[in-house]
Amino acid sequence: MDKKPRQKPEKPSDQAFDLWLKRGLHQLFDDVANEPIPEELLRLIEEDRGE
């Protein structure tokens, strides 16, 4: 048996808020998320994987 809580259907105002939030977050953070990962950080990650 699935014990997932039932989700209420979204109201149009909820959908509008979700769209506004998603667009705002993309506007703020897309440039940062698209920056290349620094080589030093990649090296540290690879070293940690080896342990």
Image (cartoon, rainbow, N blue to C red):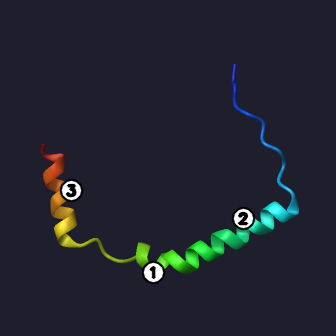
Residue 41: x percent and y percent? Answer: 21, 65
Image spot of residue 1 (x, y percent): 69, 19
What's the residue type where badge 3 is placed? Ile
User: In this figure, which residue is indicated by the disc labeled 2?
Assistant: 18
- SS for dot 1: helix
Q: Are marks 3 and 1 in contact (CB under 8 Å)?
A: no
Q: Earlier in the sequence, mark 3 or mark 1?
A: 1
Residue 37: where, in percent of width, then height?
28, 71
Residue found at the very far top of the displayed protein: 1
Q: Secondary structure at mark 2?
A: helix
Q: Which residue is mark 1?
A: 31
Which residue is at 82% across, 54% downward? Answer: 10
Please tell me in which quadrant of the rendered image residue 51 appears. Answer: top left
User: Circle 3 sits in a helix, a strand or a loop, which is it?
Assistant: helix
Give the residue displayed 45% in from the left and 80% down from the top: 31
Q: Residues within 10 Å of mark 1 (few under 14, many from 20)?
A: few
Vertical side of 3 occupied by 51: above or below: below
Q: Where does label 3 land, which residue?
A: 45
Which amino acid type corresponds to the residue marked 2 in the rendered image? Answer: Asp
50 left or right of 25 in image: left
> Given the image, on which type of amino acid does mark 1 rest?
Asp
C-alpha gap between disc 3 and disc 2: 34 Å
